[in-house]
Image (cartoon, grey):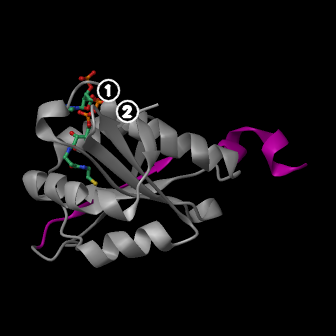
């Protein structure tokens, strides 16, 4: 299975993908903290010894969140992002968390299409959320307990 937990030795490769795509500015320490946090689910996609993608989730019950997902440019559109996303959503399900939130730059249409194709629904826009003034588009997965009464324990 090419998807495995992220470890400290992966951070340089992860930072390289982040820099290549210029979509986020986390530093080494932030990734270290994420790896150490008990509520974080951080994974990488490794192929032929090279890291070509990663994802970071916070598994916090009803407040679970996808913080970051990226696939290096040359490896995109091969289903790797979908596999990383699915791995996190499966983990969420295992931990009985039935909802996942995320925010993404309003102009990042590529990622927004990707999320919408994977069942995320737009539920709001946060004005001037990013330091450069760009709005954030807020997405969430369907909360299955809203539609499946058996999950409400009634
Ligand atoms: C979003 C991202 C993770 C998708 O990874 P990926 O490995 O290409 O995803 P997949 O191959 O599994 O799925 C591709 C889907 O994403 C969308 N997509 C990817 N590239 C796209 C493009 N250039 N234009 C429009 N849609 C695009 C489409 O829905 C596409 O499905 P399709 O190929 O059937 O049309 C990747 O594009 C990426 O790393 N982007 C830069 C980082 C980023 O913006 N992350 C999200 C913010 S945290």
Give the camera-side residue of 72 and 99.
72
Residue 11 horizontal/vertical position (percent): 28, 62
Q: Residue at x 28, y 38 (%)?
A: 49
State which quadrant residue 77 falls in.
top left
How many neighbours does mark 1 have within 10 angstroms: few (below 14), some (14-19), or many (20 or more)? few
Question: Disc 2, disc 1: CB below 8 Å?
Answer: yes
Give the magenta range: 133-154
Q: Residue at x 21, y 61 (%)?
A: 12
Residue denoted by label 2: 82
Q: Is residue 47 above or below residue 151?
A: above
Work out which residue is located at the far top of the displayed protein and give it: 78
Any atom of ligand 1 within 8 Å of the CB at mark 2?
yes
* Residue 23 image offset from top left, x and y in percent: 16, 58
Task: Classify residue 125 by image quadrant.
Answer: bottom left
Image coords of residue 92 (percent x, y): 60, 49
Q: Is residue 10 left or right of residue 85?
A: left
* Picture disc at residue 20: none
Foreground residue, 50 or 133?
Answer: 50
Q: Which mark is residue 79?
A: 1
Ligand 1 under 8 Å from disc 1 Cβ: yes
Q: Is residue 150 magenta?
A: yes
Count of marks placed on residues: 2
Give the CA separation, mark 2 to mark 1: 5 Å
22 or 29: nearer the viewer: 29
């Amino acid at each position: 299975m090419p998807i495995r937990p992220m470890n400290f030795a992966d951070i340089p490769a992860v930072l390289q993908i982040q820099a290549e795509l210029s979509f986020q500015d986390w530093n080494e320490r932030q990734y270290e903290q994420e790896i150490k946090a008990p509520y974080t689910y951080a994974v990488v996609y490794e192929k032929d010894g090279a890291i070509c993608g990663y994802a970071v989730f916070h598994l916090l019950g009803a407040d679970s969140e996808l913080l970051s997902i990226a696939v290096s440019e040359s490896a995109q559109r091969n289903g790797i992002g979908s596999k990383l996303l699915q791995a996190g959503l499966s983990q969420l399900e295992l931990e009985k968390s039935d909802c996942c939130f995320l925010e993404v730059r309003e102009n990042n249409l590529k990622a927004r299409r990707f999320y919408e194709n994977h069942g995320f629904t737009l539920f709001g826009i946060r004005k001037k959320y990013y330091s450069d003034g760009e709005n954030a588009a807020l997405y969430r997965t369907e909360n299955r307990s809203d539609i499946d009464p058996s999950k409400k324990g009634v």
